[in-house]
Image: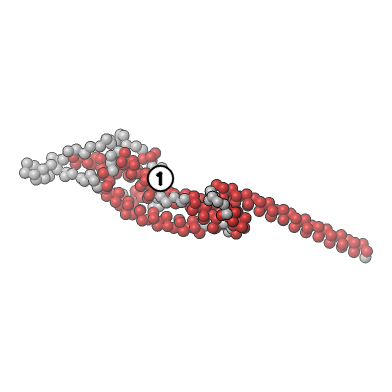
């Protein structure tokens, strides 16, 4: 019996339009979440998960013995076509680096799928673990609040691409724990005293406002100090002039 499938070479989608993320060393979970629906929607997932095994290449004779002459099993030819369509979809969703790592002759969709799983699933998890450590270690020591928040958000975006999105509450916790001590006294203490957990947007606004106020005070202090210094210099100059005139 021929393998039924509605997929043909002409109706397969352009995977570059469907999969916004191509598989690399670090984003296996996200790639998996995108490619599986594509394969299922074209009834090709069975060629990947092994539930549609390859039929014999040749038809048996009257004695139920497999012949190896020119009598090719049409089910085999149909299976190969569908399998290679599934493989084409998978290959189109890979980065050039990944495709170069697995490229070889006589590949099937199933073998390629297992190779990708073995090679990149564990690598992606290692990448996620490293990013989570980096997130927890991102501190605000030097630079502006905006720069600090930008570093935190950049790591959070990488984690999302690696299939491990960070909840907003966790991002807020990281910021509150790792911001400079001045802001802990001015902002974080107030935020933690609220009845409702503070959102990232509100925390960002409070930190930026506190930074602006702090910078304004610093400028006024520097200006006042500069005024005092100028006054002292002028007084000293006047005293010298008086002494010089008296002499």
Figure quadrant of residue 10: top left
| Mark 1 crowd level (few <14, some 14–19, many ≥20, 10 Å Cα) | some
- Residue 161 lies, in percent from the top left, at 43, 49
Q: Quadrant of the image for the N terminus?
A: top left
Q: Nearer the viewer, residue 80 or 2?
A: 2
Task: Please identify the residue farthest to the bottom as the structure is shown.
Answer: 247
Answer left or right for 26 relative to 187: left
Look at the image and tell me whether residue 24 can be seen: no
Which residue is at 63% across, 52% downward?
211
Answer left or right for 53 relative to 122: left
Q: Nearer the viewer, residue 137 or 108?
A: 137
Figure quadrant of residue 13: top left
Figure quadrant of residue 179: bottom right
Q: Quadrant of the image for the C terminus?
A: bottom right
- Residue 201 lies, in percent from the top left, at 55, 47
Task: Please identify the residue farthest to the left as the structure is shown.
Answer: 63
Which residue is at 32% across, 54% downward?
118
Q: Nearer the viewer, residue 78 or 209?
A: 209
Total numbered labels placed on residues in the image:
1
- Residue 122 lies, in percent from the top left, at 36, 56
Answer left or right for 149 relative to 107: right
The residue under label 1 is: 21
Which residue is at 41% across, 50% downward?
163
Look at the image and tell me whether residue 137 can be seen: yes
Which residue is at 31% across, 34% downward?
11
């Amino acid at each position: 019996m021929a393998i039924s499938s509605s997929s043909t070479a002409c109706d397969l989608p352009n995977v570059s339009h469907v999969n916004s993320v191509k598989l690399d060393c670090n984003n296996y979970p996200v790639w998996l979440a995108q490619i599986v629906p594509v394969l299922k929607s074209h009834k090709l997932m069975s060629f990947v998960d092994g539930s549609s095994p390859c039929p014999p290449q040749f038809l048996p004779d009257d004695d139920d013995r497999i012949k190896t002459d020119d009598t090719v099993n049409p089910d085999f030819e149909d299976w190969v076509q569908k399998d290679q369509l599934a493989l084409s979809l998978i290959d189109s969703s890979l980065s050039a680096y990944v495709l170069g790592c697995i490229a070889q002759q006589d590949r099937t969709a199933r073998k390629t799928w297992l190779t990708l799983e073995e090679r990149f699933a564990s690598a992606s998890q290692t990448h996620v673990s490293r990013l989570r450590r980096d997130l927890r270690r991102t501190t605000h020591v030097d630079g502006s609040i905006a720069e600090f928040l930008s570093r935190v958000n950049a790591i959070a975006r990488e984690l999302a691409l690696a299939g491990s999105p960070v909840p907003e509450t966790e991002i807020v916790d990281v910021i509150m724990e790792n911001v400079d001590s001045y802001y802990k006294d001015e902002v974080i203490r107030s935020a933690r005293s609220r009845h409702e957990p503070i959102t990232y947007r509100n925390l960002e606004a409070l930190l930026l406002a506190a930074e602006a106020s702090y910078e304004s005070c610093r400028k006024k202090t520097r200006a006042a100090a500069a005024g005092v210094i100028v006054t002292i210099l002028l007084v000293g100059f006047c005293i010298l002039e008086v002494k010089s005139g008296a002499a």
